[in-house]
Image (cartoon, rainbow, N blue to C red):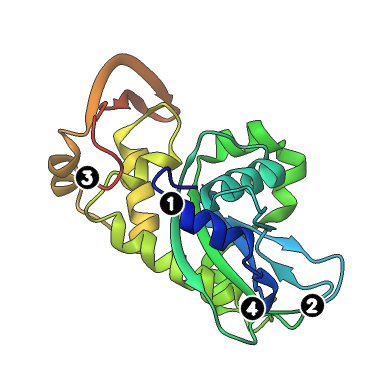
Amino acid sequence: MSDTITQQDKEFLNNYDSSIYEKPSITVDLLVFTIEDEELKIVMIKRKSSPYKGMLSLPGAFVGMEETLDEAASRGIKEKTGLVDIYFEQLYTWGEVKRDPRMRIISVSYMALVSIEDLYRAAGSSEISNHLYTVDKLLQSEEHIAFDHKEMIAYGRERIKNKVEYTQLAFEFLPDKFTLPQLQKINEILLGKELYKANFRKKVKDMVIETEEFISGGAHRPSKLYVRKINTDNIEN
């Protein structure tokens, strides 16, 4: 409560009847994206109860009375995947009156980005692999997805495609050390198109730092490893 509240306000609030208004419930729906087998994938669950029992849906959580939206999103991501301290951002607020057949529920969708290595480490590869679905296949499929979650996935997919052009978003899908071909491939997957090697390397040269380490290239010569350049700005820049 604000420190500037007056005595008159306190008296008003002591007598205020909050039951005169109906109260919608608030949820957060979580779009946890990763890249595996050169495909953009998302964490989905099969609902164990009605409504939409047996259908795919995004993981989510109801917002507690003493929680902020971000706190609820962090809690939901941790409960569903074991992940903590990862990048996530608020996407959009979904407020169609009939979007949930149970009651009036407003949902705030969040997008989280994580490397497959971190996801497997946090959640366990055998556990989480059954919950990973290819985003493009989900969007193209005729299979019904619970609630308005297919719209949320489409919205998140488009946000990623737009942001990768002007941010360092692609780095969120990589391990701490990576090769430039790996970084380029991640960008191509997110953009849905091939990139010219020379142009791409020119674009990212100020975003990476060369190490003295190499990774075996198998039949090819070893590739040099790089790390992301520490930036005091956030992912938006």
Locate residue 170 relative to residue 124 in the image: left or right: left
Q: CA distance from mark 3 to mark 1?
A: 42 Å
Residue 21 has which mark?
A: 4
State the residue position of label 3.
Answer: 237
Residue 202, percent across and down?
12, 41
Residue type (three-letter) at the residue carrying disc 2: Tyr
The reply to whether callout 4 and callout 3 are in contact (CB within 8 Å) is no
Residue 162 has which mark?
A: none
> Hey, which quadrant is residue 44 in on the image?
bottom right
Badge nearest the viewer, 3 or 1: 1
Secondary structure of the residue carrying numbered label 3: loop
Callout 1 crowding tier (Cα within 10 Å): few <14, some 14–19, many ≥20: few
Residue type (three-letter) at the residue carrying disc 4: Tyr
State the residue position of label 1.
Answer: 6
Locate residue 39 relative to residue 194 in the image: left or right: right
Residue type (three-letter) at the residue carrying disc 3: Asn
Residue 52 has which mark?
A: 2
